[in-house]
Image (cartoon, rainbow, N blue to C red):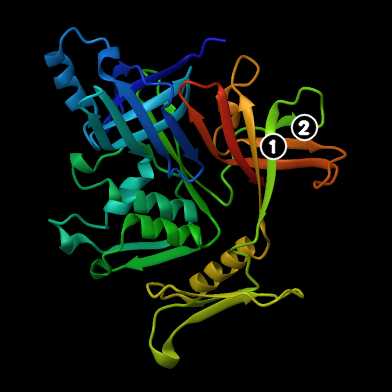
Amino acid sequence: MESPRECWVHDTFTGDRLFKLNPEGSSSWTAKVSGVDESSLEFVAEAQGFDSRAEARAAFNDYFDADTRFLVVSWGDHIESATFNRVPEYDMSAGTFKVTGRGIRAFANDRSTFGVNNYINGDLTITNRTHSGAAARVMARLTQWAPEWNLPVDLSADASGAYSRAVKRDEMVTGESLFQAIEEQGYEIGFRPYFTSTYSVRWQMLVQPQIAIGAAIDVPLSVEKPVATDVSVTDDSSKRLTGVFYVGRGHGEDTITAWAGSPNGRPIRDAFRYAKDIRDQAALQAMSNAAFAAERFPVRQWSLAVDAGDDFSPMLAAPGRLLDMSVADDWWVADGTYRQRVVSVRGSYGSLTLRPEVQAYG
């Protein structure tokens, strides 16, 4: 089938669609449930439809500008990749561009609770909010100060809950470290791009123990012509732990600590971690519990290939989608149906084949 993929330039602050481009087939991307997306999009200058080099030069310097523009790859109304230009590379002899991009969450690495010109306003206090509400308040702080701080994000739901955190400006923490502190209590923070009615792009901020989108779809593997091919299963025990010990704020005997663990008959592999910005023992205990729950067992990850087309939209393999993988009479995996969640998906502009990575859900 003819691919309905398109690639457009969008404005960072508004999300507005600006100009259509024609990438090379080798252009590729990886979308992740966490929003830490990556892309490498390639363009031949003379294939972009400009009437003159002067016109093209002005446009390319605008459209490939780092951070003020982002590139969107879409399949109909579904966004496969939306990444901000970070490293545009021009090959003068070949007349080609390679634009490396990152997902919207990358901005959280470069922003703190204050701007360089308003340190005095950098304290941030979050009191008795849900984890979703706490993440929303962090994101609001990262985008509140001036037009240059704006990002087209719909904040996650805010409500009363058990999460509290007091950040002092002299800690100079990044937004990403604040997100990670919330995630370390057993939550995920993701950013799902979507089109508005005018094809501007916005991101829906999602905060859940396991981010999931839509109903599960059946993917039978033990049939003559399965939807998924090239299936492999990896059990990764490289980070498997029997216990985790956290050290929080304080000195000497006044240091707060927390632990979680159980050998369960296995050789001891413990982890010792520092969270010196955490003052609350209950918060530290929640971090210990979440870390051990996530790392006490090997991570089983399935890799597979699916072909996009009329019978299988790329939307069904997007990060957060659920797949019911049915197995029968296999050498390694016991008979049954395994509900999996797409944690990342790789694609390339010139291929209909998508390569999701999935892990157990629930």
Q: Residues within 10 Å of mark 2 (few under 14, many from 20)?
A: some
Res. 319 image quadrant: top right
- Kindly check if marks 1 and 2 are in contact, taking CB atoms under 8 A apart as contact: yes
Residue type pointed to by label 2: Leu
The spot of residue 76 in percent (x, y) is 48, 17
In depth, the one of 120 and 223 nearer the eye is: 223
Residue at (63% x, 65% y) in the render: 240
Label 2 belongs to which residue?
221
Q: Is residue 268 above or below residue 297?
A: below
In depth, the one of 126 and 295 nearer the eye is: 295
Residue at (16% x, 63% y) in the render: 120
The spot of residue 290 in percent (x, y) is 58, 64
The spot of residue 359 in percent (x, y) is 64, 46
- Mark 1 element type: strand
Res. 254 image quadrant: bottom left
Q: Whole-Å distance between the Cαs marked 1 and 2?
A: 9 Å
Q: Residue furthest bottom?
A: 253
Q: Which mark is residue 231?
A: 1
Residue 70 shown left or right of residue 32 in the figure: left
In depth, the one of 118 and 26 nearer the eye is: 26
Quadrant (top left/top right/bottom left/bottom right) for the N terminus: top right
Is residue 259 visible in the rendered image? The answer is: yes
